[in-house]
Image (tube, rainbow, N blue to C red):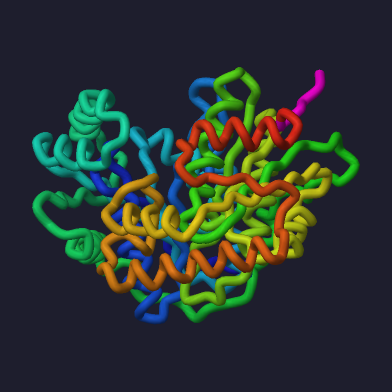
Amino acid sequence: MSDVRVPLLWLSGPTGVGKSSAGWELFAQLSRSGVKTAFVDADQISLCYPMPEGTTHHVRAKNLAAMLPNFLAEGVRCLVLAGFVHTAEEVRTYTDLLPEAAFTLCRLRVDSAELKERFLGRGWRPDLVEDALAEAAALERSDYADVCVDTGGVTVSEAARLVRERSGGWPGVLPAATPESSVALRSRPPALRGDAAPFPVLWLCGATAVGKSTVGYEIFRQIHETGVRAAYADVQQIGALRPHMDGHDLKARNLAAVWSGYRAMGARCLVVSGEADSDDVVRGYGQSLPGAALTVCRLHAGPATLAGRVAQRGRGGGPAIPGDELRGLGSDSLHRIAERAAREAELLDRAGAGQLRVETDGRPAGEVATDVRVRSGGWPFLSG
């Protein structure tokens, strides 16, 4: 068994401090320099609700431990994790399950005025800003982190530089890349059984900016608010590895890994959003989930709607998804992306991709989500 451990930098801090933004920027900087790096947003691997109180870190740690062998098999050299944590005991939930990782804990902070400004600037749940400020005050009294970095008044790029600098030049001198180790093989989760009871999976696909994540998450929300334990995954968010060919194999294996964790917690259905240029691609993902009863819904929007949504994301609107590469682009680049999205929609229409085609032009996400469920027979049509 190898004693070499993969460096893992965990960025934590209060809601709105910029964990995901700084983490993604650090991931991007390292990968541009040629270091094969993975990024995981902890929020994206614990989307299984309603969940028993106090189990969030357990679910996240198990899913991260299940995904790490897949990253190791791809030759990952280091991993950046973004997510909240409050105590050393919570940290141990992760370190106990990931002995092959060398953790560095970095807590980000800003003063209360700037935190409030950042939080409100996201345009999401402004009613929770006081909770975020109280969380920040409590974290100032914590002692779980190895290092604390104040990112007040600096750009995201500068924040990432400060984090690396004050974390001892993380990730430091890296050992030579090695193939998947016996430690990684040992930590693989049990394979999903194909003879278990079938479970419903709803896959939302479509052109760039059509609203896959927004509608997918809304369907997930509608289901779990009825009391049915449901899970959600955005495949783009569980396979961030660079430099890397943007294939589907890693994402499919990580999807199987997180679903195994969700199913162990009693999830009864899975909503997935993801790019898919053909039914064959989606079926490939389905094969990684033995027992899945797969329904594929393709969302559609016209060129004008796609252009408007691309522009909105360029301005920072829409869901705050880590690594949204439309955010902050200039008008020329956004125009080219909108034209490409329109071509994607046309090609998907010609191919007749998906079992369902649902129009999203001029419709709010909640209405589209309800329409998808009705037209798919009342998905997830659970019995018992």
Q: Height in image: 10 above or below 38?
A: above
Which part of the image, by quadrant, shows the N terminus?
bottom right
Q: Image check: 264 left or right of 145?
A: right
Residue under the point 64% across and 51% down: 298
Query: Which span of residues is magenta-colored?
Result: 379-384
Q: Image check: 358 left or right of 200?
A: left
Residue under the point 36% across and 39% down: 84
Which part of the image, by quadrant, shows the C terminus?
top right
Image location (x, y in percent) of residue 138: 23, 28
Residue under the point 22% across and 59% down: 156
Whether residue 361 is visible to the viewer of this picture, yes or no, is yes
Image location (x, y in percent) of residue 278: 70, 64
Whether residue 102 is visible to the viewer of this picture, yes or no, is no
Closer to the camera, 209 or 324? Answer: 209
As for residue 63 lying within the magenta part, the answer is no
Image location (x, y in percent) of residue 334: 34, 67
What secondary structure prevails in the magenta region?
A: loop
**On the image, which quarter does residue 125 sit in?**
top left
Q: Height in image: 380 above or below 34?
A: above
**On the image, which quarter does residue 30 sit in?**
bottom left
Q: Image check: 231 left or right of 284?
A: left
Image location (x, y in percent) of residue 15: 29, 37
As for residue 383 lying within the magenta part, the answer is yes
Residue pushed farthest right? Answer: 195
Residue under the point 32% across and 58% down: 311
Closer to the camera, 228 or 375? Answer: 375
